Amino acid sequence: MKTNKASILSGVVITVVLFFAIQVNAQKLELTPFIGYETGAKAYTNRGYLHIGDGMNFGGSLDVALGGGRFAELSYSHLKSYLSIDDPLVPHTKSDLTVDYYSAGILQELKPKAKVSPYGLFTIGLVNYRPATGDISSENKMHISIAGGIKIRATERIGLRLQARLLMPIFYTGTYFSVGSGGSGYGMSGGIVAVQGDFTAALVFMIR
């Protein structure tokens, strides 16, 4: 099942990348490196809570203008954090954790011709949880996110972008983080679990 899901996600990513490769030949582009703060999260399991720590995150986005203040966006964000487990049978279980979000979606500006323009953003994509220890398995999950912010155009080529975003990973029924060579796991029910948010500031480089 995991192999099928990974194949589907890989197909989606390849399709989106090809779409952008076609579009960038003729359209206005915005390249946006960002840095910010990402909140922690927790998820209830059958053996206690999993905690994901908060911290500074960074990444970037590539936006392709579609017209009317609408952009197709690809983005990536990276968080160095930790994973801890509240399990009375295995006390003090903790590991360094990397959380990477890969996203694709649509951004809509409300005042595309103004120097200061509010916008909304909706994306879907993949989130990868990667513990540093080999005793805890990595997990790949789909996510959806919504965001809002403002773009400030300082010049025709450079601007600022301030954004708040809600990140909502989707866990399937029966998902678990496995621990140890014996294959014991921490099961989670399906649904939107381990919700995070981030607040970022970015430079915007406008091309073409």
Image (cartoon, rainbow, N blue to C red):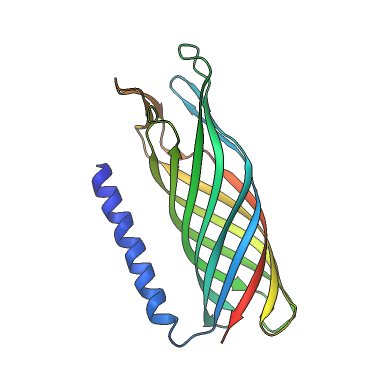
Query: Residue at image x 27%, y 42%?
Result: 2
| Left or right side of 7 for 158 | right
Quick check: 16 above or below 197? below
Question: Does residue 80 appear left or right of residue 157 in this picture?
Answer: left
Residue 8 image offset from top left, x and y in percent: 29, 55
Which of these two is toward me, 176 or 135?
A: 135
Q: Residue at x 54, y 66 (%)?
A: 61
Quadrant of the rendered image containing residue 54: top right
For the point 40% across and 45% down, the residue is 141
Q: Quadrant of the C terminus?
A: bottom right
Residue 186 in the image: above or below residue 67: above
In the rendered view, does 32 fall on the left or right side of 104? Answer: right
Q: Position of residue 142 (x, y in %)?
A: 41, 49
Quarter placement of the N terminus: top left
Q: Is residue 131 above or below residue 104?
A: above
In the foreground, 163 or 82? 82
Number of numbered tags placed on the structure image: 0
Q: Quadrant of residue 130?
A: top left
Q: Residue 204 appears at what percent x and percent y?
A: 64, 72
Residue 132 position by quadrant: top left
Looking at the image, the residue that sits furthest to the top is: 89
Q: Nearer the viewer, residue 32 or 186?
A: 32
Residue 110 located left or right of residue 129 = right
Residue 125 percent location from the top left of the image: 43, 56
